[in-house]
Image (cartoon, grey):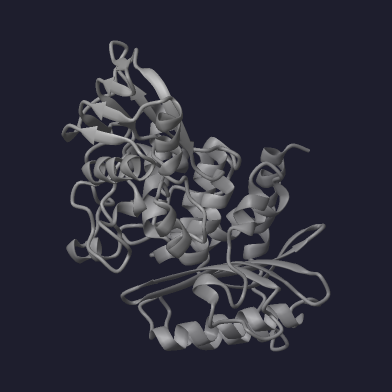
Amino acid sequence: MTARPALLLLALTAAALAAVPAQASANQVANTLGRYVGTSPQTGALIWRLDESGPRVVASHQPEAARIPASTMKLVTAAGALTALGEDFRFSTRLYTSAGAKLQGGVLKGPLYMQGGGDPVLSTRAYANRHLGGRGANIIRLAKPVRRRGIKRVNGPIIADERIFDSKRLGRQWLSHYTLYSQPLSGLTTNQSFAGNREGPYAARPAIASGKRFKATLRGVGVAHKGVVKTGRTPQRGRLLATAKSPPLGTLVRMMNTTSDNHIAETLVKDVGAYGAGTGTSAVGSRRITVALRERGILTSTDRLADGSGLSRANRLSAASLVRLMAFAEQDGTWGRALTNSLPRGGEGTLRRRFLGSARKRVRAKTGYINGVSTLAGRVVSRRGKVYAFALLMNGGELTAARAAQDRIVALLASGAADAI
């Protein structure tokens, strides 16, 4: 059976099971959820046990209702990017000079074109070591080949080409103050659009900042530069000097989901548009992700993707859609493992203070928080090896109570409290 028919069967089975609520008094999971939604009814929740015979509903509350997902939206972004590009895909930043540039006596007379490829983690070594766990396409990979070619000086401009993306710096339909939570977007960015390290301000013009950072990197490897730094377009017949590749996409989505990195999420949505349709916009990327996941029977017409990070309050997902996504990932070998492995375990990343007991190695989950919204979605394996997919989208309730209910439900699943239901 191929992946797509298998999921269609899975969705049909779920539809039938959803009509049979699992609310018996012995069901501690359903009882915990019931107590919470009694005071916070604007909740969408669904928990499946993924049995060999098909999914079994353990507990649910308005599972098809469209809710604000907050950062659990990044599950959809990760799935969309992985299905569009593949987990081994790497983004390339390239350095060119013009066809007419001349090299004499160690001096290159001509421009350098720094062509962005939508890499969200192109960085200096110091930034990568401090903030990216040592990962990232180090910008020095663009500079060292210049020196190895015998170039000691460049007389000509550095032209930063960010045109793989549009010029919009923010995610779609954001509240104005959300600019505090995600750096300016660009097809060419270094150090994730920070002017320095994360403690400092953002770079107002990411491409120019990247060009200046590259100029400093050239100087560090012994190549002087005389000329301006400006934006522009790389010529079609330029001469390639160097390429810096990002980590594989599977690593990037792990970096994104472990720490809930908004900048990576918003960049990946534009990348899906750029590499899939030749249009690097958030709107095109979101549409392509929507179509791809609807074709797989995961998303429905009630789901709405406004951005990639989940910062927009215009996003809407149902708990059922997120559970279908996690269930599909469980059975799809082409990208599902990369999605599941991108989620932090208890004690890691955004779960660093949660699930520190016996559930620690049994849960992988994505958190989500914005004003009035607390969400959690992912996968749990019980002590007996039963696998659960769950989504808890709690809108409008008290956040401390929401988190307590989430933690209790996951702990019960990990302990095996629902294994016999």
Q: The C terminus lies in which quarter of the figure?
A: bottom right
Name the residue at 70% across, 73% down: 362
The answer to which of 102 and 60 lies nearer the viewer is 102
Name the residue at 41% across, 46% down: 122
Q: Is residue 264 left or right of residue 390?
A: left
Vertically, is 67 above or below 109?
A: below
Q: Position of residue 59 (x, y in %)?
A: 63, 74
Q: Position of residue 358 (x, y in %)?
A: 71, 84
The answer to which of 45 and 131 lies nearer the viewer is 131
The answer to which of 145 and 295 lies nearer the viewer is 145
Vertically, is 283 above or below 397?
A: above
Q: The N terminus lies in which quarter of the figure?
A: top right
Vertically, is 151 above or below 270?
A: above
Q: Position of residue 4 (x, y in %)?
A: 67, 39
Q: Is residue 61 visible?
A: no
Q: Position of residue 236 (x, y in %)?
A: 33, 15
| Residue 394: quarter of image | bottom left
Name the residue at 67% across, 46% down: 7
Name the residue at 24% across, 32% down: 158
Q: Is residue 22 visible?
A: yes
Count of number-bearing discs: 0
| Residue 280: quarter of image | top left
The answer to which of 108 and 84 lies nearer the viewer is 108
